Image (cartoon, helix red, strand yellow):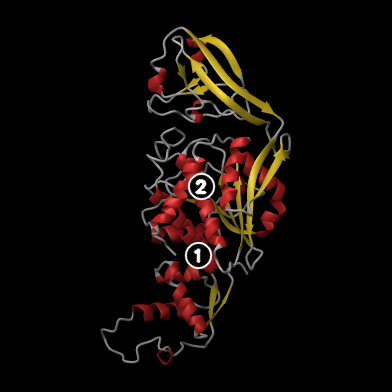
Amino acid sequence: MITDNKSLGSEIYELAERLWPINRSITGQGVRETLSLIKAELPNLAIYEVPSGTAAFDWTVPKEWLVRDAYIKTPSGDKICEFRKNNLHVVGYSTAVDKKISLAELQSHLHSLPEQPDAIPYVTSYYEERWGFCLAHADRLNLVDGSYHVVIDSDHFDGSLTYGELIIPGTSSKEILLSTYICHPSMANNELSGPCVTTFLAKHLLKQKSLRYTYRIIYIPETIGSICYISKNLTHLKKKVFAGFNVTCVGDNRNYSYLPSRNGDTPSDKIAVHVLKHFYPSFRKYEWRDRGSDERQYCAPGVDLPIASLMRTKYGEYPEYHTSLDDLTNVVTPDGLLGGFNSLWLALEALEKNTHPRAAVICEPQLSKRGLYPSLSRKNNDIEETSLIMNFLSWSDGHHSLLEIADKCGRPIWDLYPIIELLVAHKLVNIRCYDQ
């Protein structure tokens, strides 16, 4: 199903607008506030807390970070780099500071992008104590010598890491995993597009009358969140997860792209490539070495989950990435979000319907007596659909999946959905699930 319902794109965009002001990080109230707004859309979302100091493989859940205010007061008394005006102004996880320093000392704590003079960069220091501010390079060039009062009103304390989980049961205990992250401050494509599109995918899944697979949908802080989640659920995930996607950067209106799992040949990989080949043929295909998000954790040795990434423009590949320019005006649009939703929904629908058809009769069936083949043979018969039916049946040996048959027929898998329903209704094929 491909929807051109503009209102759906607008609904996803409106959720992004509500989430936009929140200061998110890998821990803290911003994550909880974000999950609270998502839970209003998905009431069955369960929210979990993992205490600071908890071991997760080679990592440890860090202390919680709370920032109340931050700014720099210039020699003339003006406030700049105000956290309350833009939460990117503060280096993530900055320690507290309240002192007067010279411009020379201040410069060692400032971050800007000379190549993008109007952008505020996104900078973090999660695992080493430091403090800092981020600002547009054009503003940095205007700083004058003198005494600067720097204030970061923040705390680090034993708290917890927060994540959300939604389980949508299907008839099979085999699972499809959707993972998205909620740990970046106000950025649109690199942060908000993922959780917002995922939320509406979940809402759409909940509307289905029946689902073949069970869906495990998680909202986590990137890296430490996925590591923590895997450490708590590894045995179950390895046993049950049959396919899945890391959902990120699905909101711009420029391109579509695909990053494979480490294996590169999982159901997720095959479905993603097939969908994009027919949905947006000029999509960009990346290699595993181009990875950079939570697919690193899901596909790590010893974990080896079948997780790929189906994106719009990939993280790190658009100029606004990790800056204040990645916003809801310049980058993310309702149409872009709708496109991200459609591409992922086509992939989930294909996973649901990717059965192994097997012909129920010996030799070629007589289609004409069932009204499936022209009873009058002539040169100019329009037999495109009939030809598709015949090709479909010729590959229905119980060994080829619906996806493989679609590839052999040179058609998108969704063109075969009505064909298989028709042939099942006429008792010409039987089907078995793809994961059996």
Residue 214 in which image quadrant: bottom right
Q: Is residue 108 visible?
A: yes
Residue 248 disc label: none
Q: Mark 1 belongs to which amino acid? A: Ala
- Name the N-terminal-most of marks 2 and 1: 2
Q: Mark 2 belongs to which amino acid? A: Gly
Q: Which residue is mark 1?
A: 350
Residue 426 drawn above or below residue 279: below
Disc number lying in front (2 or 1): 2
Mark 2: secondary structure: helix
**Quadrant where the C terminus lies?**
bottom right
Mark 1: secondary structure: helix
Residue 415 in which image quadrant: bottom left
Residue at (70%, 34%) from the top-left corner? Answer: 159
Image location (x, y in percent) of residue 290: 49, 43
Q: Which residue is mark 2?
A: 194
Q: Residues within 10 Å of mark 1 (few under 14, many from 20)?
A: many
Image location (x, y in percent) of residue 400: 52, 72
Residue at (51%, 64%) from the top-left corner? Answer: 349
